[in-house]
Image (spheres, grey):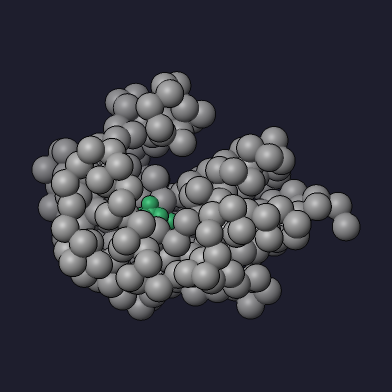
Amino acid sequence: MPVPNIIAIDGPAASGKSTLGKRLADALGYLFFDTGVMYRAVTWAALQRGIPIEDEAEVTRLAETAQIDVRPPSRDDGRACDVLVDGVDCTWETRRPEVDANVSPVSAYPGVRRALAAQQRRIGLRGRVVMVGRDIGTVVLPEADLKIYLDASPEERARRRYREILGRGGQANYEEILAGVRRRDEIDSTRAVAPLRPAEDAIILDSDCLNADEVFARVEALCR
Ligand code: DC
């Protein structure tokens, strides 16, 4: 079997998709594209510009008109890529708690999804890509050669987020993080457009009982 040209990795927040995707892309010499950063960039820009998150028309207009760039990392500060909105680097700002708290409603707006998914599809169809998100295998690139759905329990995912924040020197409350993970799961999987779910032909991996190395080894074996 040839190495898959387009690889889609979907799954809930903090399931380890980005870690797996980046590592796989590096191993194959492919582009790594984390589509969540685009939804985060629109959310950050809306907050920054004082656009109320509940104003669907304005937030959609922003998604349609803002120039969102996702580029290879320009700095060695732990980032997987640079994220720019209209030329302004907002890579770390898109990880702030205000963005975490508002990104799910933004990503539920059909017009926002249409605008961002079209850009993602254009990039994905060039091939030699590992694209990570919620709807890559189902909506953005249903023709992907390999589809992985990476799952983990809310408790395990909250634990990982908690450790990650402490590791960056930040402060965190586990119970609050767990509540946030559950809230986002609920919105992401019940929204009308492109809800979070595995594609019918996706391979489902549960990372509760597999560490990052084991997940990577399984997926790499599927590729080669
Ligand atoms: O993976 P993440 O936590 O960075 O994603 C941020 C938000 O964007 C999350 O609420 C789900 C949404 N998202 C989406 O709806 N579709 C994608 N392809 C990627 C992310």
Write the residue at 21% across / 69% down: 179
In the image, residue 201 above or below residue 11: below
Q: Position of residue 164 (x, y in %)?
A: 32, 48
Find residue 161 and report its image quarter: bottom left
Q: Position of residue 185 (x, y in %)?
A: 34, 71
The front one of 110 and 205 is: 205
The mark tally for this picture is 0
Q: Position of residue 125 (x, y in %)?
A: 67, 47
Q: Is residue 37 visible?
A: yes
Q: Is residue 118 visible?
A: no
Q: Position of residue 200 (x, y in %)?
A: 63, 77
Write the residue at 32% across / 61% down: 159
In the image, residue 189 above or below residue 64: below
The front one of 213 and 129 is: 213
Q: Is residue 73 left or right of residue 84?
A: right
Find residue 186 and report its image quarter: bottom left
Q: Is residue 219 left or right of residue 170?
A: right
Q: Is residue 29 left or right of residue 169?
A: right
Figure quadrant, ligand 1: bottom left
Write the residue at 63% across / 37% down: 26
In the image, residue 148 above or below residue 42: below
